[in-house]
């Protein structure tokens, strides 16, 4: 969610739609993590906390109550949501660099992404994952837990892994801006065909994404993760994410209120086509991926290539399908959604703590998995929203009191 956490409120219809989108996507993220404990394919019980493969990093709680169908919901999000975050983040890179300059831009990104990552990994994640340790049979003493956590060959970052990777993308953008100050305008000219020749633009984006994704997917498989200390990433996707970040930067340099994203542009006018492409490509990806999972090892290279190409298509279709639907149906202000959007980034930072503890608390409750997932989602949304709202109000009060006293003491 933090991918769109730095969007600013603007007066244009497109900007309002994108502001609303961050409210919707934080709900998707919370729903995704709320569902993970109840997927049908999970093992009967969790593995050891301090032994590979450390499955609790992806599934911190494993409940015996399952619901078939949640896998489809989670798979749908997995194919596009993080790519969408990188794309939306890229939209505002060039205007921000031009307005603020490289040094100020990077300082703000370090404060907004680097500091929350460090604090989240160092403080919030240990508190969030304590129930995982307890469910694996660990002694309840907090000191024992912290010792075992400190002796792991990694430092779990949970969903906060996205922050450091986005910060790296911003750093690369700054370095390129210093060496080639006109890169944004060049990328903007390359992207300008999106408004006049959208088919050509999306064909190019598909081709570049495929070239970026295919070699790594073949080398590491689609689902493999790597982790070095607190820095985790899905090994098949860093170059793919970079393409979406650059695509967003190019379209942002063109201006988000015109061209592809205009209220009368291709996405808004042909939203039915994009929703159909999103649904059809996802169904195709499910069909091909099910064949890959059922195939004997080693999987035929041709089938792996087909699976990778279908992923690229499904990612593109669902990213732009969601944006098209938002431009068409969610471009007007709504009070609750505006407030949700304002707090979305903070909710992304804290929601995992509530998800894991609520899933752990519901372990002994005899309810279907889908019902538990719904309860966790509702409670986490409310608790995260309330926590961030209170934190913002306390921070504002503290700033007013401290800054106000200093201003009064030093009126000159």
Image (tube, grey):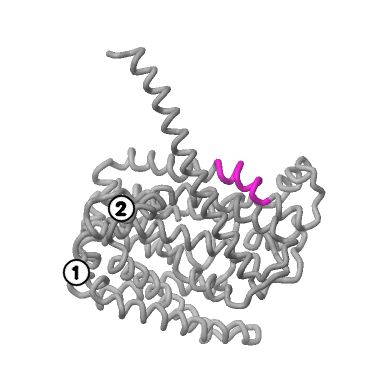
Q: Quadrant of residue 187?
A: bottom left
Image location of residue 155, percent across then percent down? 64, 49
Q: Quadrant of residue 249?
A: bottom left
Label 1, secondary structure: give it: loop
Q: Nearer the viewer, residue 201 or 393?
A: 393
In the picture, the quarter occupied by the N terminus is bottom left
Q: Is residue 102 shown left or right of residue 141?
A: left
Q: Nearer the viewer, residue 349 or 122?
A: 349
Is-magenta flag for residue 124? yes
Q: Which residue is mark 1?
A: 264
Image location of residue 271, percent across then percent down? 29, 75
How many residues crowd around disc 2 within 10 Å: few (fewer than 14), some, or many (20 or more)? Answer: many
- Which stretch did the figure color magenta? 119-129
Residue 286 versus residue 146 in the image, above or below:
below
How many residues crowd around disc 1 within 10 Å: few (fewer than 14), some, or many (20 or more)? Answer: some
Residue 115 versus residue 203 in the image, above or below:
above
């Amino acid at each position: 969610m933090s991918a769109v956490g730095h969007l600013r409120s603007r007066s244009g219809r497109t900007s309002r739609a994108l502001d609303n989108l961050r409210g919707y996507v934080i709900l998707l993220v919370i729903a995704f993590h709320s569902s993970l404990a109840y997927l049908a394919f999970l093992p009967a019980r969790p593995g050891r906390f301090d032994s590979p493969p450390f499955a609790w990093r992806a599934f911190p709680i494993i409940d015996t109550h399952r619901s078939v169908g949640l896998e489809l919901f989670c798979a749908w999000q997995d194919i596009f949501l993080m790519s969408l975050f990188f794309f939306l983040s890229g939209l505002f890179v060039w205007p921000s660099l031009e307005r603020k300059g490289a040094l100020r831009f990077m300082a703000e990104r370090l404060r907004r992404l680097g500091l929350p990552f460090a604090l989240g990994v160092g403080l919030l994640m240990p508190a969030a994952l304590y129930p995982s340790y307890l469910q694996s049979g660990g002694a309840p003493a907090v000191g024992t837990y912290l010792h075992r956590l400190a002796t792991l060959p990694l430092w779990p970052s949970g969903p906060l892994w996205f922050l450091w990777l986005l910060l790296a993308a911003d750093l690369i953008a700054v370095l390129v801006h210093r060496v080639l100050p006109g890169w944004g305008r060049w990328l903007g000219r390359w992207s300008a065909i999106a408004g006049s020749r959208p088919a050509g633009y999306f064909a190019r984006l598909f081709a570049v994404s495929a070239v970026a994704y295919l070699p790594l997917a073949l080398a590491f498989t689609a689902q493999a993760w790597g982790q070095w200390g607190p820095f985790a990433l899905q090994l098949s996707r860093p170059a793919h994410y970079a393409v979406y970040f650059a695509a967003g930067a190019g379209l942002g340099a063109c201006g988000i209120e015109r061209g592809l994203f205009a209220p009368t542009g291709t996405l808004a006018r042909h939203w039915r086509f994009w929703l159909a492409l999103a649904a059809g490509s996802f169904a195709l990806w499910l069909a091909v991926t099910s064949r890959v999972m059922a195939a004997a090892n080693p999987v035929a290279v041709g089938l792996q290539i087909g699976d990778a190409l279908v992923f690229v298509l499904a990612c593109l279709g669902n990213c732009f399908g969601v944006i098209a639907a938002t431009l068409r149906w969610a471009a007007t202000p709504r009070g609750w959604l505006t407030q949700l959007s304002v707090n979305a980034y903070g909710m992304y930072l804290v929601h995992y703590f509530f998800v894991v503890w609520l899933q752990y608390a519901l372990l002994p409750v005899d309810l279907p998995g889908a019902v538990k997932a719904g309860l966790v989602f509702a409670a986490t949304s409310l608790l995260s929203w309330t926590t961030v709202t209170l934190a913002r109000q306390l921070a504002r009060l503290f700033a007013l009191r401290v800054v106000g006293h200093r201003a009064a003491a030093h009126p000159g």
